[in-house]
Image (spheres, rainbow, N blue to C red):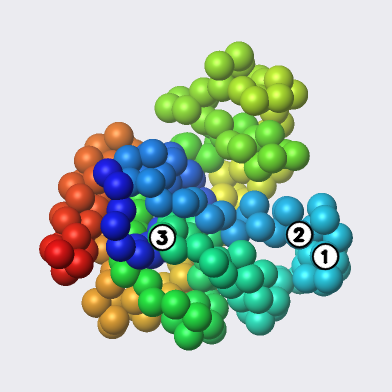
Amino acid sequence: MALNKIFRAVIMGPPGSGKGTVSARITKTFGLKHISSGDILRANINAKTELGLLTKSCIDQGQLVPDDVMSRLILSDLRGLDSWLLDGFPRTVSQADALDEACSVDTVINLNVPFQTIKQRLTSRWTHLPSGRVYNTDFNPPKVPGFDDVTGEPLVQRDDDTPETVTRRLKAYETQTEPVLEYYRSKGVLQTFSGTETNKIWPHVEVFLHRKLSFVKEQVA
């Protein structure tokens, strides 16, 4: 589906909610460029940019990256891009405000997956640390068990994928992002998709975006 108007979307959901899979399908089906905050952070840290060094310093000290630094990092990457799907940002109301000041967001897709389902998923999760690619032995396994599809390097299971740590991370996500969801809900751009299986959630996301983009096209015509 070719876009003939600027369309900007944000995707939200807790770790393990299937955000990566849904994002990849949106990118393939609708041609939106997928912008991952994690990729931007890694690229800036590896390139030793000013903001990258500042970010690394925060991470090394176990601190959260300040909102203004995150906003500058992400917004500088968005400059010059028309249509996109933003993943991992904004995570606070302050970041959402900064994004709003820079550009308008057409829709926010929120994946609402029960925490118990996510716990089961994350304990089956394996990661290629250098790239951040994530696999799941249940529904998104690597082509060769234990190895990354692209580089062939070994996958590892992260220490924070234990049930106790996962519970803490999910509660922290809920506390941090509920105000952001409310922010977008109040603006009338939040669309929540609930379920336990990505393959069952995806068709609803796809239908919604087809409708949304058809409306955008009618507005242009």
For the residue pair 185 and 214, the one nearer the viewer reads as: 214
Q: Does the residue at mark 3 contact the one at mark 2 (Cβ under 8 Å)?
A: no
x, y percent for residue 38: 63, 55
**Amino acid type at mark 1:** Thr
**Do residues under tags 2 and 1 come within 8 Å of each other at their CB atoms?**
yes
How far across and down, in percent of the image, does residue 154 sit?
A: 74, 24
Q: Secondary structure at mark 1?
A: loop
Disc 3 marks which residue?
Answer: 83
Query: Tag 2, which secondary structure?
Result: helix
Residue at image position (38%, 46%) is 31
**Label 1: few (<14), some or many (≥20) within 10 Å?**
few
- Residue 209, image x, y percentages: 24, 53
In three-dimensional space, the C-alpha distance between marks 3 and 2, rounded to whole angstroms, equals: 22 Å
Q: Is residue 199 left or right of residue 52?
A: left
Q: Which mark is residue 49?
A: 1
Q: Quadrant of residue 75?
A: bottom right
Residue occupying image coordinates x 70% and y 76%: 69
> Which amino acid, mark 2?
Asn
Of callouts 3 and 2, which one flags the residue occurring earlier in the amino acid sequence? 2
